[in-house]
């Protein structure tokens, strides 16, 4: 199947910089999500569950039935309507007992589809081994798998699904905030953003309460008058606005042909030549047949033919200091595709003419 490459350019106007809130680029120390996971069984499948060779599914089903007081013979147990899954969820900060959670299920056996299944009660634990939530309920699958008469049709991923509000918090994570200060950690390193945030906080309060303690961390002291309204003060600080630093960067995804180019990308004067070379090799077979009653033998020979077709390359000079829009126009003028543009950008970077970070993902 031929994949269509995607070319994506992200442009930012230098004269109209975006204004964002501190909460969009920074997080408060200690306030974060926690990952939960568990192992469970999905039942009620229409013959699309794990096969008999998936031993751990059979063992899990037998163990569960035995805990319910039902004695079964493991060798006689079929699991085509049962699938083993891993269940994951995110426990948000300050979650309280009884709060619902969305859970995600992924098959770990050889089940064909989880469509129509129901997850049995599954405990969800954190890395410390303690159980913080329980999950159970009917599964919503965003795909399907149909097979009949040796033919099959699959859409999306029927071996993964979700249960909206299928989890329930059973244990809270204790959270203690410092009474005299809190720390802001910036998600991506940018010293300019840290400095701007510190200045915005001190200007808002009219005093030097914010101090840069590391290139990605700000310590904010809480004035005495706000000790009884801690969260109001924290919310006011997080809502302060700054102008984010725009990085000169080019992101390339070679798998999909996606390219994201920031507006601050600049290049030096460079000449770009682009053309394709196509080599076609064909074999023609000739048969030499001897005359009747001549006693000769039939001879088969192959005559290879090689044809070389080279597309007429175009040479374009890109002047120094052009913007990303100028670069796009210049490359479009020589008829490059997104896939070719990836190679051209890598070559320009190797030549030292691309003044931006080039990141391949």
Image: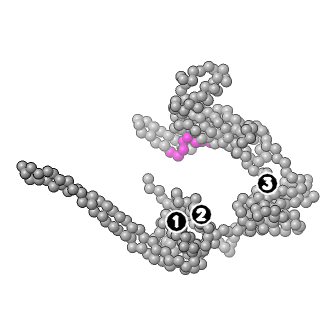
Query: SS at mark 3?
Result: loop
The mark lying in front, picked from 2 and 3, is: 2
C-alpha span from label 2 to label 1: 11 Å
C-alpha span from label 2 to label 3: 29 Å
Question: Which residue has dot 2 on it?
Answer: 359
Q: Is residue 140 visible from the viewing direction of this image?
A: no
C-alpha span from label 3 to label 1: 39 Å
| Residue 355, placed above or below residue 229 | below
Q: Residues within 10 Å of mark 3 (few under 14, many from 20)?
A: few
Residue 314 drawn in magenta:
no
Q: Which residue is at the front of the view, 314 or 169?
A: 314
Q: Earlier in the sequence, mark 3 or mark 1?
A: 3
> Residue 326: x, y in percent?
56, 75
Instruction: State which region is magenta.
Output: 155-163
Residue drawn at x 57%, y 28% as measured from the top left: 58
Residue drawn at x 79%, y 58% as measured from the top left: 184
Q: Earlier in the sequence, mark 2 or mark 3?
A: 3
> Residue 351: x, y in percent?
54, 73
Question: Which residue has dot 1 on it?
Answer: 342
> Residue 343: x, y in percent?
50, 66
- Tag on residue 29? 3
| Residue 223, placed above or below residue 102 | below
Q: Is residue 233 left or right of residue 355?
A: right
Query: SS at mark 1?
Result: helix
Q: Earlier in the sequence, mark 2 or mark 1?
A: 1
Q: Is residue 313 visible from the viewing direction of this image?
A: yes
> Residue 255: x, y in percent?
52, 57
Residue drawn at x 15%, y 51% as measured from the top left: 298
Residue 161 quadrant = top right
Residue 159 drawn in magenta:
yes
| Residue 231, placed above or below residue 193 | above
């Amino acid at each position: 199947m031929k994949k269509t490459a995607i070319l994506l350019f992200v442009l930012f106007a230098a004269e109209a910089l975006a204004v964002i809130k501190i909460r969009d680029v920074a997080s408060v120390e200690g306030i974060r999500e926690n990952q939960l996971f568990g192992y469970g069984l999905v039942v009620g499948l229409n013959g699309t569950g794990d096969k008999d060779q998936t031993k751990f599914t059979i063992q899990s089903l037998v163990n569960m039935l035995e805990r319910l007081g039902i004695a079964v013979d493991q060798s006689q147990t079929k699991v085509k309507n049962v699938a083993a899954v891993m269940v994951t969820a995110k426990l948000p900060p300050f979650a309280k007992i009884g709060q619902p959670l969305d859970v995600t299920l992924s098959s770990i056996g050889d089940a064909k589809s989880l469509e129509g299944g129901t997850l049995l009660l599954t405990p969800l634990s954190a890395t410390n081994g303690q159980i913080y939530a329980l999950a159970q309920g009917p599964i919503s699958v965003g795909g399907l798998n149909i097979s009949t008469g040796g033919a099959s049709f699959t859409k999306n991923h029927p071996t993964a699904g979700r249960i909206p509000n299928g989890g329930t918090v059973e244990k809270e994570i204790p959270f203690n905030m410092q009474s005299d200060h809190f720390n802001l950690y910036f998600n991506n390193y940018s010293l300019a953003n840290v400095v701007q945030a510190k200045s915005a906080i001190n200007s808002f309060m009219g005093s030097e309460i914010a101090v840069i303690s590391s290139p990605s961390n700000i310590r904010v002291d809480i004035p005495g008058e706000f000790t009884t309204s801690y969260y109001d003060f924290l919310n006011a600080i997080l809502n302060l606005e700054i102008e984010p630093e725009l990085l000169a960067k080019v992101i390339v995804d070679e798998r999909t042909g996606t390219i994201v180019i920031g507006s601050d990308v600049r290049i030096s004067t460079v000449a770009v030549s682009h053309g394709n070379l196509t080599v076609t090799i064909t074999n023609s077979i000739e048969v030499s047949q001897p005359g009747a009653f001549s006693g000769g033998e039939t001879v088969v020979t192959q005559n290879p033919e090689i044809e070389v077709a080279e597309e007429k390359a175009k040479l374009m000079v890109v002047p120094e200091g052009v913007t990303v829009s100028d670069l796009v126009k210049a490359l479009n003028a020589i008829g490059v595709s997104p896939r070719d543009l990836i190679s051209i950008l890598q070559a320009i970077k190797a030549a030292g003419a691309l003044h931006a970070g080039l990141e391949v993902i």
